[in-house]
Amino acid sequence: MNIGSEIRSFRDLAALDKARFLARFMYELTLEARQFYSPAGEQVIDAGKLRFINEIQHRITRFIEQILIDDPARSTDDAMLRLLLAPRSVKTMESLVRAAYART
């Protein structure tokens, strides 16, 4: 995956399309998160990884809101895409994020 190319593609989208794209990414990320808790939902298998996904979701939902209200204080598109797609020390999480992104 070429991060620069992904940033350029995202930057070229209209505001509503950016919000839609990120909402779809969040949906795909929730599917990835299912591997970190038991099927019955009673016991968390990996709380740290679920926390990581929750933090990503938190940042994306705020970014979507800022796109929709045209908030001049929002992060740049470049910063958001780098947050999502940058290499990570925990390769499991990098793979998870990239898999969700690729399906978006």
Image (tube, helix red, strand yellow):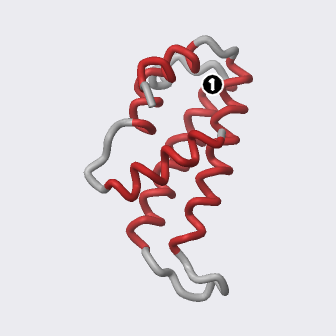
| Residue drawn where x is 44% and y is 21% of the image | 78
Q: Quadrant of the C terminus?
A: top right
Residue 26 at x, y = what percent?
63, 47
For residue 46, above or below residue 26: below
Depth check, front residue: 17 or 4:
4
Q: Is residue 41 left or right of residue 43?
A: right
Q: Is residue 52 left or right of residue 89?
A: right
Within 10 Å of disc 1 (Cα), the crowding (few <14, some 14-19, many 20+) is many
Q: Is residue 20 left or right of residue 56?
A: right
| Residue drawn where x is 68% and y is 40% of the image | 23
Q: Quadrant of the N terminus?
A: top left
What residue type is disc 1 on?
A: Ile
For residue 63, above or below residue 99: above
The quarter of the picture where residue 3 lies is top left
Count of numbered badges drawn on the protein? 1
Label 1, secondary structure: give it: helix
| Residue drawn where x is 50% and y is 42% of the image | 59
Residue tagged by mark 1?
67
For residue 92, above or below residue 8: below
Residue 60 at x, y = what percent?
55, 40
Q: Is residue 93 left or right of residue 14?
A: left
The quarter of the picture where residue 85 lies is top left
Q: Residue furthest left?
A: 89
Residue 92 at x, y = what percent?
38, 58
| Residue drawn where x is 69% and y is 26% of the image | 68
Depth check, front residue: 16 or 2:
2
Q: Residue furthest front?
A: 1
The quarter of the picture where residue 35 lies is bottom right
